[in-house]
Image (spheres, helix red, strand yellow):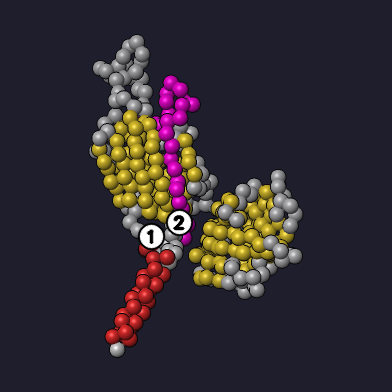
Amino acid sequence: MKKTYLFHILFLAMIAVVGFSSCDEESIEPTLLNEELVGESIIRLTYQDTLVIRKNVVATVDEKGLFTFDVKGKGKDMLSITTFKFEEGLFPSNINVAKYLFADLSDVGLSVDHVNPLTNTGWIRISSINKVGGSVDGEFKIKIYPPILLDPSDPNFDLQTGIINLPKAFEIQGEFRNLRYQRAEGDYFETKIDGAAWAYKTRKVSVVGNRVVITTSNSVTEEVMELSFDKNVEEGNYGLENFQAKYKSANGVNYSTYLELGGSTLQIKENKNNRVKGSFNLKMKNEAGTQTLNFTEGSFSLAY
């Protein structure tokens, strides 16, 4: 009896250990798809021995991919961060120029060295973009140079140099977490092909019969991508019964979506007044069925 009782105890203990081990090894999806679950939007700035924390800031991305956000600094000062591309990567701040509004001076300093504009004054890093949740994470370390003011009536004006006495250049470090962003009104179409951004040169939207056909192409590599769906499609999520996509690679290989292949979804977020907005993930294979390509993080807003 004692041996049986001991066996049950050991058996239950083994189940508990296996159960806990399995839970610990479970993979967790790092990109939260529900916008409400993304987390609190927060920006932290550290400069001149001061920590500044701001919440509920919203960034913008224009139709050319210019990423910008403004955040209140010390007092009534304002910092504006910009990158010329909205993609993960490191951007030098003497080219992707940051601006700092000195409220007391009513003038703006820049992350550019007035004496040597080619000097690298820091960087902005976009570390991750959640296009489904509409948020972005990153950090920055930039040097701000005060403005040069030429005003002889100012008592601090230096007649020899023509420069008003200003605070010295200073460094700002910071991070943005779960920063929400909004697309500015305008046309765009973007996706990644096996993880690499689709770098097309031309874009055309046409209506063929009752279908909207979006064609993007690169005349240099001769790549072409096409996405088509019903003109009167309503807001919602769709499978391949309701849309089609195809792609010609730089090697001239034709790829298409196939119902039996699966892995393709289309979400229509808005379709009215001859403008359609949506997002997609596609899986295509070549005609021989020997190769597949994944088109991820696709999004568009286009007039037709």
User: Is 50 placed left or right of 127 in the picture?
Assistant: left
Crowd tier of the residue under label 2, counting other residues whose Cα lies within 10 Å: few below 14, some 14–19, many 20 or above: many
Crowd tier of the residue under label 1, counting other residues whose Cα lies within 10 Å: few below 14, some 14–19, many 20 or above: some
The magenta segment is 107-133
Residue 177 x/y as whole percent: 37, 51
Question: Circles 2 and 1: CB distance less than 8 Å?
Answer: yes
Of all residues, the one furthest to the top in this rendering is: 160
Quick check: can you spot residue 211? no
Is 114 magenta? The answer is yes
The residue that disc 1 covers is: 38
The one nearer the camera, 59 or 171, is 171
Residue 222 x/y as whole percent: 72, 50
The residue that disc 2 covers is: 130
Amino acid type at circle 1 is Val
Is 120 magenta? The answer is yes
Does residue 98 lie above or below 287 as drawn?
above
